[in-house]
Image (spheres, helix red, strand yellow):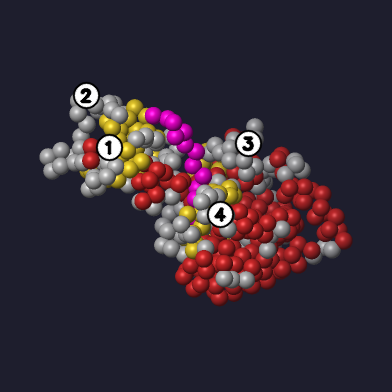
């Protein structure tokens, strides 16, 4: 391996953040980059990030190992400690999601993210996509370059095999971490790595290289389709990213599913299987008019509202919960939803009287009178008239003074809550991610 090829791969990028687990792959990548910096390209600015998931009893010792190597190589290392959510996606997916989230937050302006996936990883990814029944987009697997956050994600080792990485590590006497979980074949990727690929590669030694080439060809075909369908997708989507259903009904199944795949890609969603796409169309898009269909895919749902498909994050909220907000009205955290605070911006309402108990709720009974309207309406009717989607209704904070509804924060103010020039309270709702 010629590290000058690595410099060509980097193109004009000179500020680099390396995802550094301390395993063989990322150790070789970081070593190659520091060698490149020290011998050919002193202008390279290299940082590394190690994510501590807390899944192994040895996790703390891995941090020490990574810190030692980075000191030796003159690389600034940041360690991120994360707790995995219990999303039901499985430990592998949850760990990956947490890892990329902290890496995204750590990226500096003009910095690109480098990860160390290699040819064998690519082969495993393609086989897992086949198992899921993915189409060409899934079989394209991992591209060498990918738009990521406000920058790019680069995979410089994607055309190198693990054997080649091991040779490099042996030549330079590198040490690395061996994660014991990699030997646990209850995980699909480990099962392929431990039991399936060794048999295949014994018969066909260049199998991984051929699979990588096939993935590249699938990627090229997907890129071509992206270009051909981009204008039509834009025409079908609103500024908020929802997708108009009616024109999709006039398309062939092949074109419709191609559009739906690109809609998922627009929302940076994991590419669904064909069965999942069929369920989106049959169970959500084509459900009866008076239904409120939903299909959960990971931490998001596909919902339908007023003739369009929406990609909505799953939000858990106890609609019966009542939050007390006593004076002096410090910022109020609404579990999983965001923070309410009195600011110099936001929604204007009247200030509460001294004897009025201030609460935040998510239900309101009886007729409500919106400021500027003469007739009262049930809250359900108000939501419908204002075109508020069902999933937003359940998480919109309702401000009460005593038993009087004052405002649906960010949506409307009632007659009881109207402010005046001499009597204004500004409520800001900083929504959670």
Q: Could you tell me how far apart the alpha carbons at marks 1 and 2 are, in whole angstroms?
A: 15 Å
Question: Mark 1 — residue?
Answer: 406
Q: Which residue is mark 3?
A: 55
Is disc 1 in contact with disc 3, using a CB cutoff of under 8 Å? no
| Residue under the point 23% across and 40% down | 415
- What residue is drawn where x is 49% and y is 59%? 308
Q: CA distance from mark 3 to mark 2?
A: 51 Å
Q: Is residue 74 left or right of residue 108?
A: right
Residue count near mark 2 (Cα–Cα under 10 Å), binned few <14, some 14–19, many ≥20: few
Q: Residues within 10 Å of mark 3 (few under 14, many from 20)?
A: few
Q: For the magenta stretch, what is the residue range?
A: 310-322
Mark 3 touches mark 2? (CB < 8 Å): no
| Of pointers 1 and 2, the one earlier in the residue sequence | 2
Q: Which badge, 1 or 4, is on the more N-terminal residue?
A: 4
User: Which labelled disc corresponds to residue 288?
Assistant: 4
Secondary element type, mark 2? loop
Classify residue 182 as left or right of residue 150: right
Camera-nearest residue between 308 and 88 = 308
Q: Does label 1 or label 3 sit earlier along the sequence?
A: 3
Q: Quadrant of the N terminus?
A: bottom right
Task: Give residue 230's position: percent from left, percent from top.
Answer: 51, 71
- Image point 51% across, 44% down: which residue? 314
Residue 313 belongs to magenta span:
yes
Neighbours of disc 4 within 10 Å: few (<14), some (14-19), many (20+): few
Q: Quadrant of residue 139?
A: bottom right
* Residue matched to label 2: 355
Q: CA distance from mark 3 to mark 4?
A: 45 Å
Left or right of 428, for residue 282: right
Q: Secondary structure at mark 1?
A: strand
Q: Give the vertical position of 327 relative to 315 (above or below).
A: above
Could you tell which of marks 4 and 2 lies nearer the N-terminus?
4
């Amino acid at each position: 391996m010629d590290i000058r090829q690595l410099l060509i791969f980097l193109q004009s990028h000179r500020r680099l953040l390396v995802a550094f687990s301390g395993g063989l792959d990322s150790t070789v990548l970081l070593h190659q980059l520091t060698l490149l910096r020290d011998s050919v390209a002193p202008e390279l600015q290299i940082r590394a990030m190690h994510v501590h998931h807390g899944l192994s009893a040895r996790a703390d010792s891995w941090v020490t190992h990574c810190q030692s190597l980075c000191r030796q190589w003159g690389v600034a290392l940041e360690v991120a400690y994360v707790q995995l959510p219990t999303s039901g996606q499985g430990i592998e997916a949850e760990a990956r999601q947490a890892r990329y989230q902290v890496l995204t937050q750590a990226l500096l302006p003009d910095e690109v993210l480098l990860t160390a996936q290699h040819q064998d990883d690519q082969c495993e990814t393609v086989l897992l996509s086949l198992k899921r029944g993915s189409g060409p987009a899934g079989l394209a697997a991992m591209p060498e370059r990918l738009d990521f956050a406000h920058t790019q994600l680069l995979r410089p080792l994607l055309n190198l095999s693990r054997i080649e990485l091991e040779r490099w590590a042996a030549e330079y006497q590198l040490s690395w971490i061996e994660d014991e979980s990699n030997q646990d074949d209850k995980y699909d990727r480990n099962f392929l790595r431990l039991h399936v690929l060794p048999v295949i590669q014994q018969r066909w030694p260049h199998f991984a290289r051929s699979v990588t080439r096939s993935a590249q060809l699938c990627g090229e075909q997907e890129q071509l389709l992206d270009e051909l369908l981009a204008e039509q997708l834009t025409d079908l989507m609103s500024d908020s990213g929802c997708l108009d259903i009616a024109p999709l009904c006039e398309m062939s199944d092949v074109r419709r599913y191609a559009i739906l795949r690109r809609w998922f890609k627009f929302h940076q969603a994991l590419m669904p299987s064909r069965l999942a796409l069929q369920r989106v169309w049959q169970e959500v898009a084509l459900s009866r008019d008076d239904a409120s269909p939903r299909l959960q895919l990971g931490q998001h749902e596909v919902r339908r509202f007023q003739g369009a498909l929406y990609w909505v994050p799953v939000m858990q909220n106890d609609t019966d919960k009542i939050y007390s907000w006593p004076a002096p009205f410090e910022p109020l955290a609404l579990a999983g939803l965001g923070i309410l605070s009195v600011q110099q911006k936001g929604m204007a309402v009247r200030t509460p009287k001294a004897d009025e108990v201030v609460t935040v709720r998510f239900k309101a009974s009886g007729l409500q009178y919106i400021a500027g309207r003469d007739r009262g309406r049930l809250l359900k009717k108000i939501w419908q008239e204002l075109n508020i989607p069902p999933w937003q209704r359940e998480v919109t904070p309702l401000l009460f003074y005593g038993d009087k509804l004052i405002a649906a924060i960010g949506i409307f103010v009632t007659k009881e809550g109207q402010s005046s020039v001499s009597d204004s309270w500004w409520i800001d709702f900083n929504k959670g991610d």
